[in-house]
Image (cartoon, helix red, strand yellow):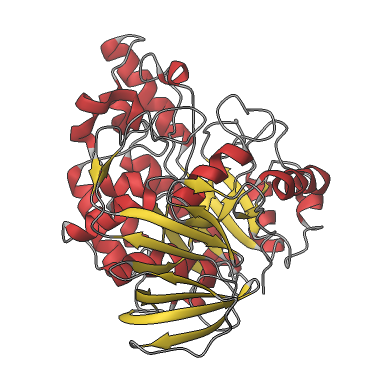
Amino acid sequence: MQLIKNATIVNEGRTYLGSVLIEGERIKAVYEGNQSFDIEESCIIIDAKGCFLFPGVIDDQVHFREPGLTHKGDLYTESKAAVAGGITSFFEMPNTKPQATTIDLLEEKYILASEKSFANYSFLMGVTNDNLAELKKIDSRKVAGVKMFMGSSTGNMLVDNLKTLNEVFSEIPLLIVTHCEDETIIKTNIQHYKELLGENIPVKYHPLIRSAEACYKSSAFAVDLATKYNSRLHLFHLSSEKEMSLLTSNIPLKEKRITSEVCVHHLWFSDTDYEKYGNKIKWNPAIKSASDRLALINAVNSNKIDVIATDHAPHLLSEKEGSCLQAASGGPLVQHSLVAMLQLVKQGEFTLEKVIEKMCHAPADLFRIEKRGYIRPGYFADLVIVDPNKSWTVSTENILYKCGWSPFEGVQFDASVLKTWVNGKMVFDNGKFDETVRGQRLLFE
């Protein structure tokens, strides 16, 4: 057994002094207040005085690049960075090599994760213009959902066949997760800026090429399809104020058929940052204006947006070089997402309880994950201790991503992740890792 005592627990909208008893993989009891315990001598006691205790973060969108793109990252390196950042479960995307668009290819990724991943894992199956039969084979207890690119991005998995789109939304009962950017608008914008500026378009034009209008038109189309067929739709990485008009905040999350996610980089950066960071903050969808950023923050606080995630997508720095049309889109984030959000709490953008709701509880509820996302008796002991007063600065020396860089280099964070448990095992402890720990395949209710 393990007892975490004297912690400031943040869970289910409350912050209070308490303790948590772990037995095996699960939480045995949660205690409120400062009390003495009659426990076995063999029980390991962890004093968390002055620190926060959170449920483990569940990141619903990462690209860990395995198989086929492991020069950028892999399941071992990126899950290691994730647990160091307080992430205990992740959902990995299908645009690897080969793309996970069949049951057999999907299961191969699960085998790799069982051997390599420090954190718990699930993999979304990719939708193509011609794999409907494979999608229908998915066991909904073992796979979180299907991922559809309704806009081209890394991996070229664009689904643009209207017949396929209608069939997926009408015939697949699983959660449909989408990347939404309208291809026609993007191509028109590229041509416009090529005529204006030539081939070497600066990155500051990226949000004008992959524009708010491109995002809105595609997201609106997805919402229309989901509404027409009463599908369960989850909109990934929303980035614009205009898209917020598609969402509702007056329905409990468990009753919503249409849900949404925002990523940390869209809450942290705006287009004024391209001059400083350049291609390091080039993502698809693009980081947009300060007013878009503010609208996203407000939407999180009003519950229009349901989940905060990373879209962790590492590339080598050499792949991030060149003009707007040449540099790869995406960047690494899992090691720094929780502390970045805690920094925004300190700046007054969010409450601590809201961050834990959107990063821990909501992903568990939305994806219907079995027994995770909360500090409750009987739930898996996926837990994180954070010292809110142990500041540190991101540098190449402490970055764990295989690609070796971060858009947060040089940023000082006021909070530090001290310890992370995955299924009751302390996998990360003050900079040291238990290399024997491996996560589990997530299961769904």
Q: Residue at x 46, y 88 (%)?
A: 37
> For this rendering, which residue is in front, 445 or 248?
445
Residue at position x 31%, y 81% from top?
16
Q: Nearer the viewer, residue 418 or 199?
A: 418
Q: Picture coordinates of residue 51 (x, y %)?
A: 32, 66
Quadrant of residue 284 within the rendered picture: top left
Q: Which quadrant: the N terminus?
A: bottom right
Reply above or below: 410 against 62: above
| Total count of labels | 0
Report whether residue 239 is seen.
Answer: no
Q: Is residue 228 left or right of residue 171?
A: left
Residue 274 sits above or below residue 146 on the image: above
Q: Is residue 335 left or right of residue 176?
A: left
Q: Is residue 342 above or below residue 383?
A: above
Residue 416 picture location, percent across and down:
33, 52
Residue 408: x %, y % from top left: 30, 36
Task: Say above or below: 186 vs 420.
Answer: above
Q: Is residue 332 left or right of residue 211?
A: right
Question: Residue 8: x, y in percent?
Answer: 32, 74
The quarter of the image holding the C terminus is bottom right
Q: Which residue corresponds to the image point at 51% horizontal and 90% vertical from the top-left?
A: 38
